[in-house]
Image: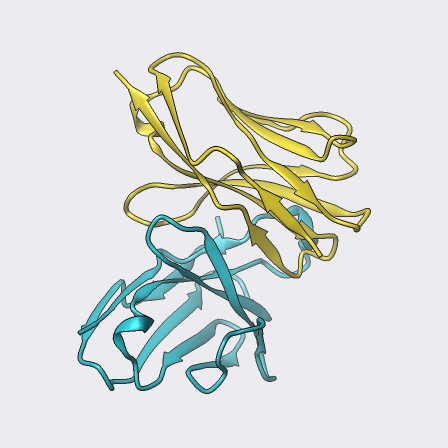
Amino acid sequence: GAVVSQHPSWVICKSGTSVKIECRSLDFQATTMFWYRQFPKQSLMLMATSNEGSKATYEQGVEKDKFLINHASLTLSTLTVTSAHPEDSSFYICSARAPGTGGRQPQHFGDGTRLSIL
Amino acid sequence: AQKITQTQPGMFVQEKEAVTLDCTYDTSDQSYGLFWYKQPSSGEMIFLIYQGSYDEQNATEGRYSLNFQKARKSANLVISASQLGDSAMYFCAMSDGGGFKTIFGAGTRLFVKA
């Protein structure tokens, strides 16, 4: 079946560092990918919708300059957490839906990235 | 606006028994999809079952079934013959008719006792 790969799975870095997370659809072309953030023991909160070849659509309250999204190809979307601080520590997870499937098919999720900012 | 509500933060079930996880939703759309995902402690999201708003039959997938009551706007997940490996977080989710965006409920943590 369709697979979404997310890398890295775990990042620990110093405050002020920028961190890039990659999300790849391995066997289908994804014109749209989604980025979620999940705090411990909480639900997934949609951060933004990544659109291939155009600007991402951010949810209300998400800082565009803090969370940069680039969807440069049909198989790759990246999320860059710029100048990360401890409050940015979280579990970030991406997803994509195979094209042409509409709302009936589930999203395929990456395995997530645990980001810890010291 | 769409909303998903899961009112059970945690549930306990005895191994081999059935358990129902509750989910209610609110939407003004006529066409929408309802999903259940399982998230083990390792973090990955595992798709379990889907129900479309126009589907007349309740969805079933192995030990999972979805009790869809459209008038009540509920989409409860039933797990039959619980197994220890079913211990995890369970999320109810909804997408709009175009499948463009999916929102998630707060989740229910299921503990299966031996």
Q: Which chain is cyan?
A: A
Going by the picture, which residue comes out furthest to the top? B17
Q: Residue at x 42, y 48 (%)?
A: B45
- Which image quadrant for residue A114? bottom left
Q: Is residue A110 left or right of residue B6?
A: left
Q: Position of residue A28 (x, y in %)?
A: 53, 62
Judging depth in this view, the residue of B38 and A73 nearest the camera is B38
Q: Position of residue B20 (x, y in %)?
A: 51, 23
Judging depth in this view, the residue of A58 and A9 nearest the camera is A58
Asked if B52 appears above or below A36 in the picture, the reply is above
Asked if B44 appears above or below B40 in the picture, the reply is below
Judging depth in this view, the residue of A87 and B39 nearest the camera is A87
- Which image quadrant for residue A17? bottom left
Q: Position of residue B31 (x, y in %)?
A: 78, 47
Asked if B24 appears above or below A48 in the picture, the reply is above
Q: Residue at x 33, y 41 (%)?
A: B40
Q: Is residue B55 left or right of residue B80?
A: right
Q: Residue at x 28, y 19 (%)?
A: B113
Q: Is residue B77 left or right of residue A65?
A: right
Q: Position of residue A82 (x, y in %)?
A: 35, 85
Identify the image's colour scheme: rainbow, by chain, secondary structure or one colour.
by chain
Asked if A21 appears above or below A70 in the picture, the reply is above
How many numbered marks, from 0 up? 0
Colour of chain B as rendered: yellow
Q: Quadrant of the C terminus of chain A?
A: bottom left
